[in-house]
Image: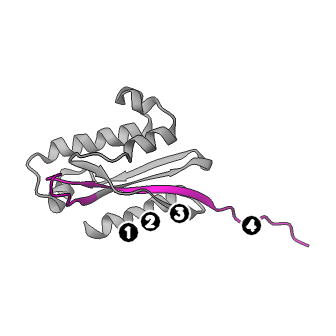
Amino acid sequence: MSSTAAPAWTAYSFAVLKVVPHPHLAVGVPVGVLLHARTKDFLGIRLVTEPGRLAALLDVADLELLARYLEGIRAICEGVADAGPVALAPPSERFHWLTAPRSDVIQSGPVHAGLCMEPAEALDELFAVHVAAGA
């Protein structure tokens, strides 16, 4: 009799990040995915930040400034100490802060739930489906 354990599924939450050049119109272009798996203590982000790729997706006046804002979001997600007080919060608080509704040029879509075996792989798959496919 074999006692191999069945693979463990992990619950996660994710949101697609989008750039909304004109917030009053509420039309956005996906540029990233944020994924949080609390039980694995995982918070990850995948973003388009290269100005050339952003230019192919968006008609924005200052692509370098947009890229810096996106890098700031990455720093908060990754808990970089000099990214400000939010970056020092626990992963679940950072996830909720980053996905909170706001009227800004960079916005989070709704938070969705899923199951995966490996959160980093799920993040890559979600990025491929929701962002890279449109790039």
x 47%, y 32%: residue: 89
Find out whether the residues at labels 4 and 1 contact each other: C-beta distance under 8 Å: no
Q: Is residue 21 magenta?
A: yes
Q: Which residue is mark 4?
A: 6
Nearer-the-camera pick, 24 or 83 = 24
- Between tags 2 and 3, which lies in front? 3
Q: Which residue is mark 2?
A: 125
Question: Element at badge 4?
Answer: loop
37 versus 88 height, above or below: below
The percent position of residue 41, horizontal first and vertical second, equals 58, 44
Q: Earlier in the sequence, mark 4 or mark 1?
A: 4
Nearer-the-camera pick, 8 or 2 = 8
Q: Which residue is mark 3?
A: 114
Question: Element at badge 3?
Answer: strand
Graded by Cα atoms within 10 Å as few (under 14), some (14 to 19) or many (20 or more), the crowding at tag 2 reads: some
Find out whether the residues at labels 2 and 1 contact each other: C-beta distance under 8 Å: yes
Q: Earlier in the sequence, mark 4 or mark 2?
A: 4
Picture quarter with the N terminus: bottom right
Q: Is residue 23 left or right of residue 129?
A: left
x 11%, y 52%: residue: 60
Q: Earlier in the sequence, mark 1 or mark 3?
A: 3
Find out whether the residues at labels 4 and 3 contact each other: C-beta distance under 8 Å: no
